Image: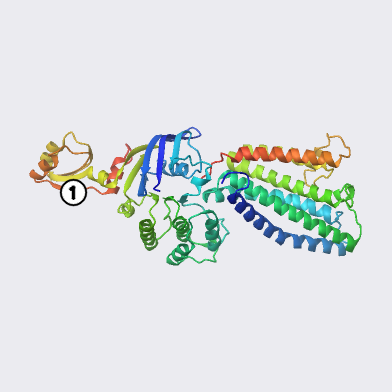
Amino acid sequence: MTTEIKADHVSLRLGNHNVLSDISFQLKGDKIYGLLGRNGAGKTSLLSLLASFREPTEGTIRINDEMPFENDRVMNQVNFVYAKDQSNETETVKGMLEFAERYRPNWNAEYALKLVKRFKLPLDQKVDALSKGKQSALDVVIGLASRTSVTIFDEAYLGMDAPARSVFYEELIKDYAEHPRCMILSTHLISEVASLIEEVMIIDCGKLLLHESVDTFMSHGLSVTGPAEKVDQLTSGLHLLKQQQLGRTKSVMIYGQLESGRRAEFESAGFELGPIGLQELFIYLTEHEGDEE
Amino acid sequence: MSGFMNHVTRKVAVDIFWRLSTWMAWCLPFYIGFFIIEHFVPQIQIDLNFFDGTIQSAKVYMLVVGIILALSVPGAYIRNGVTRKNMFNGVFIGMSCTVGVLSLVVQILYGLSLWIFGNEFGQSNGLSQIYHNQFLSLFLIFFLLCVIYFAIGWLIGLAFSRYGFLSGMFSIALSIVLVGLSEYFWNSYMKLPWRLDLLMSWLPDTQILFVTGFVGSAVILALLIALLHMMIRRMPIKP
């Protein structure tokens, strides 16, 4: 059975602060989803609702048509891996794996040990004695080897060096291909995961800005470069994310569905057209007034 | 998978039982060693026999263990997909089993100490004097008081971690009252700096029947469990 997550008008209020406001979405099918948002946008709060760490103030979340909060059928199938303070964790790496194995019904011990070797984790070492990168690697091992229907990685790579992150992405995509499940990646290293994710959700200031397939999202972005006057003339009325001018040459980034024939018009005008990267699109869409100050 | 004792609850209970038993197994030899040394070194003047000394230490130990576990256990289990209800039931079943075993071990050791060192009563109002040779009564009192102290530890730990400093302080005030009442039911005052015997001096100084003490302790424990259940059933975990 493929996984389905449905959030219906979800809001979360912590004290006097509206962390999430009226968020609705549906994640249908076993895919790798990317959850993007700036610091404090509400990503971790949203993910903590999916993992039953807390309940929404308003609205409902359903996973495979069941409410997840205090539902053991759902909770043991959701694994929320995030960067946490483990400076007081005196359990050994082996102990942590054994603990996860006891409570995760789909745990694969053989795969866990394979990952332990790949990340060069010392089984008998206490977690608090590991470096931050190794602690994150251990969390990743537990997240992947749990093989839960919903696996969430929220900045799980913190402290991991580039080779370790590369192993993480490699194992993630390989394991996903062999055991498809709903994986949600929340990250600031967008360019590193851009090729992995199939659907993207962007939240900004606690609100869902967009939720689309990566291909559709990317097709909405277009970089146009040409003579300044002509570029101004042909792009007027379009949603411009960014403009840069060097001498008489102007480059603009356009966001939105272009009317039919518009692209051909650009090409016939001799403009240089190009795609906009996921990271650039994200940056410009979540840019607020005063950010440059 | 629902119900009071499903397989997840059992797993949590086994985890907690082994963890607490391991800690106990470390602590108990030190206490026994201290008791033996105390017996042979006349300069050490502690007027408690083995049972009365152990129960005082065990209560403080369970209080501290309760606080420590309340701060770490909920997050560890909920992060691994265990519901709050299963975690809570498992912790209390596991802890009760550990305390049951400890209480039994203490009775056996107390019996041995009487056989080896003779019938030494220390403290005039010690439980072992009040319930002399009533091992089942002493077993139950030891069990109930330790479980109550553990629950009080959880109350303090949860109040601080979930509701913050002021609620935590309030939970300490409430705990002092509950500790005082529990001790009063068994005429066994804690020898702690705040001197609960003075604090509870407004209560009539009468010998309380075992049944009354048992029912009173059970009511306090039921109240504590109900309060803890309310605190934990919708408890948020901070990522």
- How has the structure been colored for display? rainbow
Q: Percent position (x, y) of residue A134?
A: 47, 61
Rendered image quadrant of residue A203: top left
Q: Chain of mark 1?
A: A
Which residue is more in the foreground, A146 or B184? A146
Q: Which residue is depicted at the point 38% across and 36% down?
A: A24
Q: Classify A10 as above or below A155.
A: above
User: Residue A90 location, x and y as percent?
Assistant: 58, 59
Residue B95 in view of the camera: yes
Residue B48 appears left or right of A173: right
Choose top left, top right, bottom left or bottom right for residue B231: top right
- Where the C terminus of chain A falls, by quadrant? top left
Q: Position of residue B9 (x, y in %)?
A: 61, 49
In-image side of B98 versus A114 (left or right): right
Measured from the top left, where is residue B55 in percent x and y? 79, 51
Residue at the disc numbered 1: A274
| Amino acid residing under circle 1 | Gly
Q: How many C-alpha atoms fall within 10 Å of the one at disc 1: few (<14), some, or many (≥20)? A: few
* Image: A120 above or below B102: below
In the displayed structure, B103 sits above or below A266; it is below
Query: Which SS class for mark 1?
Result: strand
Q: Quadrant of residue A285?
A: top left
Q: Is residue B27 left or right of residue B116?
A: left
Q: Residue at position x 75%, y 49% from top? A: B59
Instruction: Write the residue at 38% across / 60% down.
Output: A171
